[in-house]
Image (tube, grey):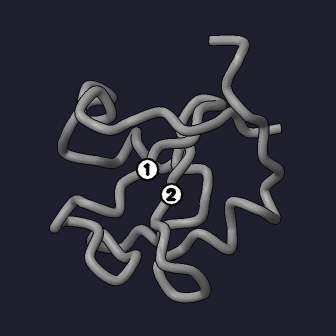
């Protein structure tokens, strides 16, 4: 996976479903494309916002990290 692009938190923050059409979230250092998910419509998923690192927030979620397996990894958070 070393050939995937690296993005800063500032770059990720713009992919929030508001500023740009892409909807991205980060988890454990990887950035996922969630634009196609109906659960991330407009960049919001329950009380979570896209364009952020959700690593610390997942512990309160009703699902496990396996939820990320259905999304494409598009980068690494640096």
Q: Residue at the location (82% across, 65% down)?
A: 10
Residue receiving disc 2 = 24
Quadrant location of the C terminus in the rendered image: top right
Q: Residue at the location (33% across, 29% down)?
A: 65
The quadrant holding residue 29 is top right
Residue 8 position (above or below residue 40):
above
- Residue in front for this viewpoint, 18 or 53: 18
**Image side of residue 38 versus residue 1, left or right:** left
Residue 11 position (above or below residue 63):
below
Residue 49 rendering spot, x and y as whole percentages: 47, 72
Residue 2 rendering spot, x and y as whole percentages: 72, 12
Residue receiving disc 1 = 33
- In the rendered structure, which disc, 2 or 1, sits on the residue that comes first in sequence? 2
Q: Residue at the location (50% across, 57% down)?
A: 24
Q: Find the residue positioned furthest to the front.
A: 3
**Image side of residue 40 versus residue 8, left or right:** left
Around disc 1, counting alpha carbons within 10 Å, would you say few (fewer than 14), some (14 to 19), or many (20 or more)? many
- The number of callouts visible is 2
Quadrant location of the N terminus in the rendered image: top right
**Image side of residue 7 versus residue 35, left or right:** right
Residue 75 position (above or below residue 25):
above
Residue 34 rendering spot, x and y as whole percentages: 36, 55
**Image side of residue 16 versus residue 42, left or right:** right
Around disc 2, counting alpha carbons within 10 Å, would you say few (fewer than 14), some (14 to 19), or many (20 or more)? many
- Residue in front for this viewpoint, 6 or 27: 6
The quadrant holding residue 12 is bottom right
Callout 2 touching callout 1 (CB < 8 Å): yes
């Amino acid at each position: 996976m070393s050939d995937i692009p690296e993005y800063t938190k500032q770059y990720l923050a713009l992919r929030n479903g508001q500023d740009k059409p892409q909807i991205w979230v980060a988890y454990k250092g990887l950035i996922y494309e969630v634009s196609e998910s109906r659960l991330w419509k407009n960049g919001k998923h329950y009380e979570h916002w896209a364009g952020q690192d959700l690593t610390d927030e997942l512990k309160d979620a009703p699902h496990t990290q396996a939820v990320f397996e259905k999304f494409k990894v598009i980068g690494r958070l640096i």
